[in-house]
Image (cartoon, rainbow, N blue to C red):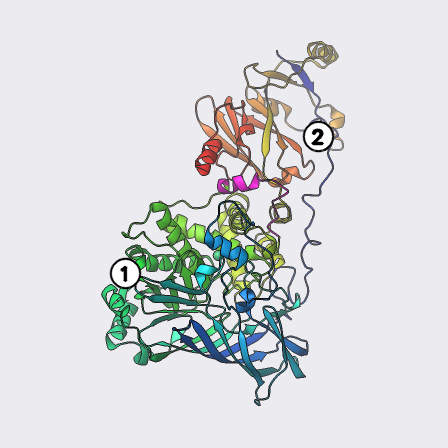
Amino acid sequence: MRLLLIILVSLFSFPNIQSQTQPWQGKFEPIDNMIAPPNSYRTASGAPGKAYWQQRADYKIKATLDEKNNMLTGEETITYYNNSPDNLSYLWIQLEQNVNKKGNPDFGDAFGGVRDNMTTRQMQSLTRAIDFPAGYTIKYIKDSSGKDMQALVNNTMMKVMLKEPLKSGESMSFSLAWSYPITDRSMFLLSREGYEYFPEDNNTVYLIAHWFPRMAVYNDTEGWQNQQFQRLGEFALEFGDYDVEISVPEDHIVASTGRLQNSESVLTKTQRQRLEQAEKTFDKPVMIVTIDEAIANEKSKASKLKTWKYTAKNVRDFAFASSRKFIWDAQAVQLETNKVMAMSFYPKEGLPVWKDESTKAVKAALEVYSEATFEYPYPVAISVNTSNIGMEFPMISFNGGRPDKNGKISDRAKQGMIGTIIHEVGHNWFPMIVSSDERKWMWMDEGLNTFLHQRTVAERYPEFHSTEPKDIVPFMQGDKNILRPIMTTSDSELLTQFGANFYQKPTVGLQMLRNSIIGKELFDQAFKEYANRWKYKHPNPGDLFRTLEDATATDLDWFFRGWFFTTDNVDMELTDVKWYKVYEEDLNIEDQQKKVKIAATVEGTEQKAKDFSSGLDMIKLSETPDQAYGGFLSRLDEDELRKQVSGKNIYEVTIKNIGGLVMPVKIEWVYKDGSKETDVLPADIWRRNEYQVSKTFLKDNEVEKVNLDPNFEFADTNMTNNSFPKVEETSQFDEFKSKKSD
Ligand SMILES: [Zn+2]
């Protein structure tokens, strides 16, 4: 069927405008009412404001590890600086070790209840049938004159009453003494610290973290941080300087946040010489404690103690690991100005892969992240091997991944191990320096960190899988009764979903912004701007959203609104492609009435075409009437226009938004001669009609096939409706999905 149409082009009537027939959802409206308004602390541009302030806490700590009883005892002096404009009548202190304390509120069973087939470890986590005496014993809290201070513990937090308010601009010191049983990691799921026992040689690896009572955050956003530690939501912490003395059995090796101050009294002469050598070695790790030495150490079982002294400047936390099992390697990494010691500590159970890969992965993270944000500022970056977890602290991380008993590791496990090391070292930037509130917004550190971690993997380990937009599709297709928006507080997310929602989805969102919406160069500048604006500070989500817009001159409210605040997905349907050609005919004006009549008789049975097999629709162009030019004296060169379109192909594409998220539309044209071309429509095409848009293209060549989002850039959840003619065969995406479910 050929359809003869005469289109009267006029400035005042656009016949192709489609009015939206479904309710308008305001997908492009500003998100100003969804994020905190700007003020003198946080500007509308997303930067810290003129009056921005934050508190500071310095710590002097002496701790002793009692290996026989698996106890940690300590004394500490906290100097707290009240930089806020407020006078404080009390202080809040974090006591995260109380999370497993008997009698404290159990914040709900995160593991899904009793099943007919479950492990004893899962049963223990449900019932706590075997008692574990977790939690702090606080021996004293004294002010600087040695007088007892009044304190009240509320679960994982402790309120310290002040006799006189701590005035704005003033500081105070006070001291605490405490002890707690170090967590048996095998008894608690989701433990980020504790000990791991190796029965074969009767030794222990201690991972000591959130171990000392420390200041809660007080800020301009919520005053005292008041969310209890419920395991999933991690930490909100103040920056400060640390002076820490750690006493451990004298045959232990300690890995710690900070710079070692007394190597001459804790390391042998040989170890010190090897360290000096490592400081000059940039191409591969130098062994500081060799495999044979570590295996010999396993047998010594010293009971005398040795004290390791560390200082750390401008960190928000402090952690360490201790064991006589540690093998230790180190190498220097030269960044633009800072030289960093990349180091790994692992028991022999991590061999050989830890010796080959750990420090190399630390180096990769240091280099890629420093380039993408700001230079790593600390003297050391340490990766410690442990079972199961990956967990980050300033300058040190605890990372899972071990070979089997024969030293074999599957390719997948090795990729997981290296990815974990990169990820946890990467956390030095987010949230250890760009210090967002993890307890509130897990995505702010996990999402941004995973984005750079995946970039590091893609750049340094191109043979590994790294996250791409299509990886998030199975999650985005999920049941909307279960899905939550990214902008969900940390402890409200399901354990089965938080990896996808707080790590992968923000990563893919940032990848889309970088690769497909803003462009790499401008995005990278903006991301760097955000990191530099907020280093050593406490950003909120609005500060990130605002900076990414402000530094790119791109209104991204539609993107943040959809990707971060809803559970909608991307599903664009290529509903129709109409193909037209202009045929030229010398028309004299008198004949026009007649032609229109002819056209009207030919018209009638317009069908939605499934493909191009029904051939062309012909269009005839008529002269623009004078009145259409209004007051213009100049006129379009109509002959030239006819010449330009004559013989060419005009395609009118109609796209429906099924998934709800507005996105740019990438259209791939596959021509009859096999060549391809791509057009990109910005997301703004959905401003006036959020459900359906049409767009017309002029093409020299004849088109055989049209595809939307051909490279899976926008995580389209249904690729079967993305092509014209419609494809019936299995799409790449289905193949991908079935691979995933394998
Ligand atoms: Zn993480």
Q: Is residue 581 above or below residue 38?
A: above
Based on the picture, tell me whether residue 587 belongs to the magenta stretch: no
- The kind of residue on which mark 1 rests is Lys
Based on the picture, tell me whether residue 480 belongs to the magenta stretch: yes
* Nearer the observer, 29 or 720: 720
| Disc on the earlier residue, 1 or 2 | 2
Left/right placement of residue 425 relative to residue 645 reads left
Q: Which residues are magenta?
A: 470-487
The residue wearing badge 1 is: 284
Residue that appears at 31% across and 81% down: 265
Left/right placement of residue 589 relative to residue 45 reads right
* Nearer the observer, 438 or 51: 438
Tell me the chief SS of the magenta region: loop
Image coordinates of residue 435 in percent, x first then y, are 54, 64
Q: Is residue 462 above or below residue 46?
A: above
Q: CA distance from mark 1 to mark 2?
A: 64 Å
Q: Determine whether the residue tagged by mark 1 lies in a helix, strand or loop.
A: loop
* Nearer the observer, 36 or 547: 36
Q: Is residue 693 visible?
A: yes
Work out which residue is located at the far bottom of the displayed protein and give it.
145
- Give the class, few, some or many, for how many residues have Cα within 10 Å of label 1's Cα (few <14, many ≥20): some
Q: Is residue 459 above or below residue 247?
A: above
